Image (cartoon, rainbow, N blue to C red):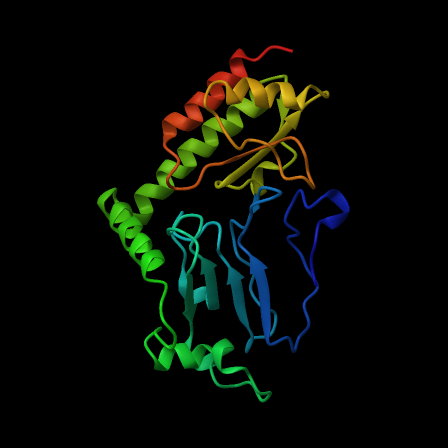
Amino acid sequence: MVGSSKESMYNHIPKKVPQSNDAVFLHVTSNNTIYGTQWKTFPTPKNPNGYLVADMSSDIFSRPIDVSQFGLIYAGAQKNMGPAGMTLVIVRDDILGKVDREIPTMMNYQTHIDKGSMFNTPPVMSIYGVNRSLHWLKDNGGIQAIEEKNKRKAEKLYYEIDRNPLFKSPIPQEDRSLMNVPFVFADGGDEEGFLSFCDHRGLKTLKGHRSVGGFRASIYNAMPEAGVDALIQAMQDYTV
């Protein structure tokens, strides 16, 4: 591990990390669902022959990505693409087949490439769900349009968090996620009371991750802007 903000509860993304000159690859997670941080500009491997690898499970298809920056992108479907049960992989041809050690057949990307992603029985319903989600995305203007919508949703929610004296964000502005928005009481408060207040308004699953506490609004592609507006209204109406 060459970079971490563990000492401050992962509340920011380290910008300058000491890389090895001979590292084969540099791995990042593009969006942290628990702590609410997101890479805005991706790092460059120090080794000119190395390549960037990214886990984009929680923000794939939420914004445009220059895939040429990466040697490998992998992403679970269960946030923006569709139901759980399948994984998207984008891999550069020239980095395949260069591992000397034996790789189990099922774990070798080349196996799945050679078989057209049907080496084993594919998860048909999950694939169908992704197909419908991608058609929905295309019908709504594609990646550029969904990015504008996601920015608008996140910006108005962060604005309320920063404006409202009851709440605060633990994440600096430059690292704030567009997908997962954590926030806490500014000076302590009744977390269960606020969650109950929201629940009675139909606002669900706002409890922060158990390792962090507080609150977390996950506003993936499918979350309508009206849902964010409803949360903002609840934050304004809530009194201690």
Q: Going by the image, does 13 lie left or right of 78? A: right
Q: Going by the image, does 137 lie left or right of 16? A: left
In which quadrant will I find the C terminus? top right
In this picture, is 28 found above or below 199?
A: below
In this picture, is 212 found above or below 110?
A: above
- The residue located at (66%, 75%) in the rendering is 21
- The residue located at (58%, 18%) in the rendering is 164
**Can you tell which quarter of the image residue 2 is in?**
bottom right
Q: Residue furthest right?
A: 7
In which quadrant will I find the N terminus? bottom right
**Residue 112 location (% of width, % of height):** 40, 77
**Residue 227 location (% of width, % of height):** 41, 27
**Residue 69 location (% of width, % of height):** 46, 65
**Residue 225 location (% of width, % of height):** 37, 29
**Total number of numbered discs in the rendering:** 0
- The residue located at (53%, 29%) in the rendering is 158
Q: Nearer the viewer, residue 46 or 161?
A: 161
Q: Residue furthest left?
A: 139
Q: Nearer the viewer, residue 201 or 173?
A: 201
